[in-house]
Image (cartoon, rainbow, N blue to C red):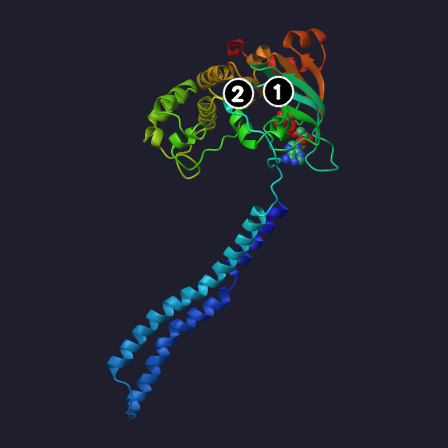
Amino acid sequence: MVETSRLTNLMIRQQMVGRWFFGFIQTFFAILPAGVYLMAGVVLHAGLKGGVSVGTLVSFTTFQSALFFPIGQLLNIQVELQGALALFDRIFQYLDLPIEIADRPGAITIPAAAIKGQIGFENVTFSYEPGITPAVQGVTFGADPGQLVALVGPSGAGKSTLTYLMARLYDVDQGRITLDGHDLRDLTQATLRAAIAVVTQETFIFHSTIRENLLVGRPNATEEELIAAGKAAAIHDRIMELPGGYDTVGGERGYRLSGGEKQRVALARAILKNPRVLILDEATSALDSHSERAIQDAISQLMEGRTTIAIAHRLSTILAADLIVMLDHGHIVERGTHTQLMAQGGAYSRLYLEQFARQPLEAVS
Ligand code: ATP
């Protein structure tokens, strides 16, 4: 609220800057021809020697207003220029920020095809800022190639943080995360980007055609592969209904896709990319049962044969998981399969009854 009123005041101030000055200049420009006519009238009336002719007078005032208009515009530019310079300052401050995640000298490159997809979290601790309580603490678990790990736990438990760390959006403070036995920090970022696809609830659609948005996953994919991915993600038919099909421009200023459609675009991107490791943040938003089913089928297909770390919100995911990791306040509090954890009758079984048990059985595939 305080910030909003500050913004309002600043915007009013921005609009008012120099307005008094412009008001004065413009009034001056508007009344100047009248002054010129008055003076010329006096001169003509007095019949002074060397006085102006009516023709000179009219052309003078006409040219005068033609000259004043650009001068007025030039004066206006000053205010816009100041605003733009301030903006440039902010942009350069941002661009000059040091890059926190960079390739180590001697970092190794592994071709995407050679990655098996074995993942290890070894005693991982991380906090977003030094001195604050770590978002995850002493987390250890692993996934063999092709396995599904479901992360569950209350809000703020650290599930998203673990997925960010896996994608190396941040580096761990203590411990290490490995891919095929290599510490992520010893691999080039290109290796990691090629090996991992991330499908989250917030998908960014670039201001470009749907085709280009999908090809982000694999720029050299053929038209057939593109359409196959669209179909597998249950978005092909919807795209064909759009005015330009795959050439429809999406993004902020283009065709606005719905939340569910964006999510399916993200799935199609991931299917095209065909990564060894999939990081999935399952949607919590309710979709109609048809779209829900379509997305669920696409996700199940996408997970097949890949190592998947999923922030699980669906019954089908936790039931299919090889390992469920239950987090609370950044710590692993329980781990095991659904059957094992239910038998323990601990925190997971309570969470299951609260969050998952009420989901319809047909969601299980
Ligand atoms: P949810 O289910 O609500 O998404 P989560 O289990 O994914 O929660 P995280 O988003 O990983 O939880 O958050 C773990 C902790 O880290 C929380 O206490 C949160 O406030 C904190 N946190 C998350 N992101 C940041 C950030 N960018 N800067 C500082 N603290 C953060």
Residue 218 appears anywhere in the view: yes
Quadrant, the N terminus: top right
Q: Would residue 27 appear left or right of 281 to someone viewing this image?
A: left
The amino acid type, in three-letter code, at marker 2 is Ala
Q: Position of residue 149 (x, y in %)?
A: 61, 16
Badge 1: residue crowd in 10 Å (few <14, some 14–19, many ≥20): many
SS category of the residue bearing label 2: helix
Residue 157 appears anywhere in the view: no
Q: Which residue is pictured at 42% across the width and 65% down the height?
A: 74
SS category of the residue bearing label 1: strand
Badge 2: residue crowd in 10 Å (few <14, some 14–19, many ≥20): few
Q: Give the residue at mark 1.
A: 119
Q: Would residue 204 appear left or right of 46 to someone viewing this image?
A: right
Q: Position of residue 355 (x, y in %)?
A: 62, 17
Q: Position of residue 165 (x, y in %)?
A: 63, 29
- In the displayed structure, 108 sits above or below 57; it is above
Quadrant in which residue 70 is drawn: bottom left
Quadrant in which residue 272 is drawn: top left
- In the displayed structure, 201 sits above or below 142; it is below
- In the displayed structure, 206 sits above or below 28; it is above
Quadrant in which residue 257 is drawn: top left
Mark 2 vs 1, N-terminal side: 2
How much space separates mark 2 and mark 1, taking CA atoms?
Answer: 14 Å
The amino acid type, in three-letter code, at marker 1 is Ile
Q: Give the residue at mark 2.
A: 114
Q: Which residue is pictured at 42% across the width and 73% down the height?
A: 28
Q: Is mark 1 within 8 Å of ligand 1?
A: no
Q: Position of residue 364 (x, y in %)?
A: 53, 10
